[in-house]
Amino acid sequence: MSFHFSDGPIVAISTGTSEKSALGIVRVSGVKNLKFLVSLTGQSKFSEPESHKVYFSRFYTKNRELLDEGVFTYFKGPKSFTGENTVEFTLHGNPFNLERVLRYLVDEFGFRMAQSGEFSYRALKNNKMNLTQVEGLDLILNASSEFGLNSGLKALNNDLYSNYLRLRELILEIKASVEILIDFSEDVGEEEIKSKLNRDFSQLRVEVDKLYQRSKGNLNDLMAPVISLIGATNAGKSTLFNKLVGHNRAIVSDIHGTTRDYISEFIYLGDSPFKLIDTAGIREGAGEIEKIGIDQSIEINRKSFFKILVINPFSFIGSDLEIHGLKPDAIVLTHSDLDGFKDRVGAISVQFKDIPLFQSGSIGADFKSGPMGADSKSGPMGADSKSGPMGADSKSGPMGADLKSGPMGADSESGPIGALNDLENMILKEYQVLKEGSPIPFVRHRNVISAIYDELNNIYSVGQDLDDCAILSHHVNILSSKMDELIGVVSPQEVLDHIFANFCIGK
Ligand SMILES: Nc1nc2c(ncn2[C@@H]2O[C@H](COP(=O)(O)OP(=O)(O)OP(=O)(O)O)[C@@H](O)[C@H]2O)c(=O)[nH]1
Ligand SMILES: [Mg+2]
């Protein structure tokens, strides 16, 4: 996809179209005059509405058939998101309604349907946003983690950009000093320039080093952290999964190999969303289809941010799991409601002595007799919980605080076994560690920063030979153009295409 478009008016539904909702927004940008508004509303006064003011109106076709009623706001350019004259209609949010209005605007007034990201592209072109802000916006719109949202907001507020600008200034200073050395090397003042150059280079190195440190680390875990449940068949993974998501999402049964396709749901730990995945249980002798599920389980587990091994201590053998070399971050023991649980735990805590143990806690009388009944009242977040995965009265997220008082507290005789909310804290802490040092959230930035870092190392390895200014100048020019690329002063078309391809229609 390439954004070489004409400047004519574009239109799109700017709110989600997959669900019915009370309100939806249709946005038009790039209109030269507001005749279409007069035609739509049937009111001549709307040929010159006040900018940034909300008006209520009915909207009609040219045959005076009612299209919808709602409010509209005119944003006179350049004081608009795109920098162009823009009109935003807030209408009834049924997607069919929005589509009908959209089609009418296209058919009757010749507006072009906007492509994904085209509004933002125009904002960039009209200097309403810089490239990093556009990338921040992309992140806000698509983030599925708290880190992603916050980083997107920061980028939109120029947090990173101002950092880059300072660095660019420094590189420009260096560039100027090198030019002076080339042109006037014999002049008095050469020594001062050389020492300034050395100072600037040292500062640059410190700054680039900091950015480089922020460009490392696993971005996937930060952006879309996955918690996966893995274990033998019938270990109780799906039961635990349902408990954590707060409703009976996964099928639970005492038949081995119940879960084949993996299932995922978002849960909140504290304020952070995490994708929780329930996987097919691992066992020997599984059929062809089940084997596919098991392979997927192992792959998901391998890539997860946090890997939970679920064990039923009454039937745990361990060999199947060892074969697959699973390296869990934590173990959750199920069936703690059954007599003899404590006796079973000892061997497991010896076998996995370096891995923290937790117990899923009481699953209550209803669970003993099989699948969670729809009216189950016994789990901390049973099906009767009406308030979703984080009930209004739940203070500690989906893993309710009442789990602390499970049958085996931290002072359990068979060693320290945490309750589920301790596990929640552990996961959150690990996520916190990932966020330390303000990692840079954009792959494009990470790549350019890494190139700048390498180039600076090149300069240092050739000895920063201030006497050979021509070589130095060559390297500094490369640094400077990389810096421009980072800032987005010169953005190759492919870079732009890549960034905007991510956007949804209407943004
Ligand atoms: N008593 C008791 N039964 C449990 C507990 N957890 C799970 N069960 C039961 O154990 C059986 C298997 O539970 P599932 O949650 O379906 O197990 P799974 O690990 O998802 O199994 P697969 O999908 O086959 O891999 C069901 O009958 C559950 O009701 C528990 O903590 N206590
Ligand atoms: Mg299951």
Image (spheres, rainbow, N blue to C red):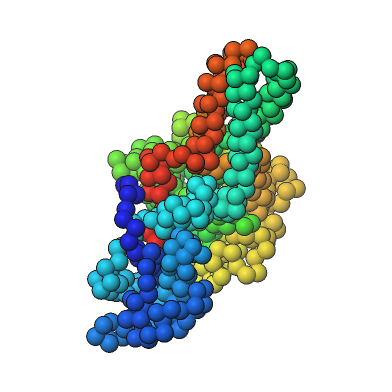
User: Taking 484 as reference, is 352 left or right?
Assistant: right
Position of residue 120 measured from the top left corner of the image (x, y, whole percent): 44, 55
**Which one is in front, 355 or 17?**
17
In this view, 375 is above or below 259: below
Q: Nearer the viewer, residue 36 or 312?
A: 36
Q: Nearer the viewer, residue 177 or 316?
A: 177
Q: Note whether 103 is above or below 139 in the view shown.
A: below
**Where, by quadrant of the figure, is residue 61 drawn?**
bottom left
Image location of residue 118, percent across then percent down: 38, 56
Kindly identify the residue that appears in the image at 66 percent across and 54 percent down.
421
Relative to 362, residue 303 above or below = above
Q: Which residue is pictured at 51% across the width and 26% down the height? A: 478
Quadrant where the C terminus sits is bottom left
Q: Residue at image x 65%, y 45%?
A: 432
x, y percentage for residue 378? Answer: 58, 66
Q: Residue at x 64, y 56 (%)?
A: 270
Instruction: Give the image location of residue 180, x and y in percent.
Output: 63, 23
Number of numbered discs visible in the structure rendering:
0
Say if residue 454 shows up in the picture. Answer: no
